[in-house]
Image: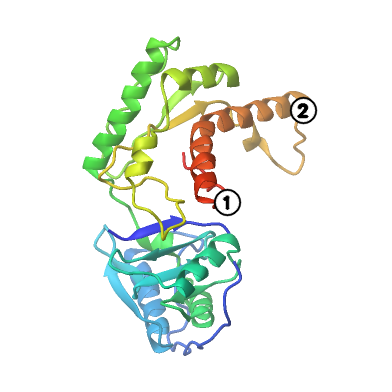
Amino acid sequence: MRKSAVLGCAVIMALMAGCTAQTTPDIPSLGSAGPATATDIEVVAKAYFDCMSQAGVPVALAENDAGELTIVKNSGSWTLQTYPNGGGGGNYDDDTTLSADAQASFQEFFENMPDHPTLILDGVDHSQAYGQCLEQTGYDFIEAMGEVRSDPELNVKQVKANNDWAACARDNGFPAIEDTEMPMGAEQPQPVLLPGSITPDQLRALLVECPNFSKDTVDQAPDWWGLEDVVASSSDTDPHPQIEIDHPLWFTRVGPDFRPSDADLIELERMVQLEEALQEPQRAYWDERLSETGTAPSPTPSK
């Protein structure tokens, strides 16, 4: 299994390596206006792969779940990377022992992730080639994945976790909460919906009787290069229940003339308090665990 994480903020090393100009004009861009055909997506991926390869970046071309040759993977034992659609991440192979310098690079990247295209492979900075190839081809990692098939085995575990929690909630004062159903095709399991009328204090009391966070699940998950900031995601562990608040999304009315009323702002504050109440058990766990290791701050919780 390859370890990975979604990270927040970094300024890393100097840029190097240029990208050879492509001869194919008007390469279709993933994520551009209008639908792209499978052929278009594969053409973009091949152009991006060729650009990266010609610049000396070790990459491989692979099929997505739909059988399209669109996935351009970085080759190497460990990677630090930002993405054109936002965010960033890092990974390393299970059989890789990171050096002190590599661990420091990960630490710096996690704390200060740059907003410009950044790609570090096994300590070599390919950011300049990466940025130029992205700009030249319009390659988009999410679009390249196509239709992602859900994992039936993981879906069974997730639906069971959701419905066990829903049954507990019904037994503890919320009889209207419904079970989730097994998804069809490429769909993902839907979360358990709590009534929008629930108060933060009611939610906290419910989570005492029906926990939405399992310490044992996280303790069983693999450790991330010694910094203890892993979020359980292993297929060998039972997932946490997925829970959301069924509240009106008033902020979808945002426009040039929209002015939230006092009632809107009060409702938004209540939504924020409910989301924080859902995350409190996980935050408390990490605050305690990280205080024991002397590592701070606590990671951003997952839902």
**Whether residue 104 is situated above or below residue 6 in the rendered picture:** below
Q: Compare residues 38 and 96 and report the one nearer the observer.
A: 96
In this view, the mark in front (2 or 1):
1
Q: Which amino acid type is marked by label 2? A: Ser
Is 299 left or right of 71, judged from the image as shown? Answer: right
Is 68 left or right of 259, judged from the image as shown? Answer: left
Q: Which amino acid type is marked by label 1? A: Ala
Counting other residues with Cα less than 10 Å from the Cα at mark 1, is it few (<14), some (14-19), or many (20 or more)? some
Residue 235 appears in the figure: yes
Q: Secondary structure at mark 2?
A: loop
Report the disc number at residue 233: none
Q: How many marks?
A: 2
Residue 300 appears in the figure: no
Report the disc number at residue 296: 1
Q: Residue at x 41, y 61 (%)?
A: 225
Q: Position of residue 38 (x, y in %)?
A: 32, 64
Q: Position of residue 249 (x, y in %)?
A: 59, 31
Q: Residue at x 45, y 78 (%)?
A: 123
Residue linked to disc 2: 261
**Whether residue 246 is situated above or below residue 40 in the rendered picture:** above
Q: Position of residue 40 (x, y in %)?
A: 37, 69
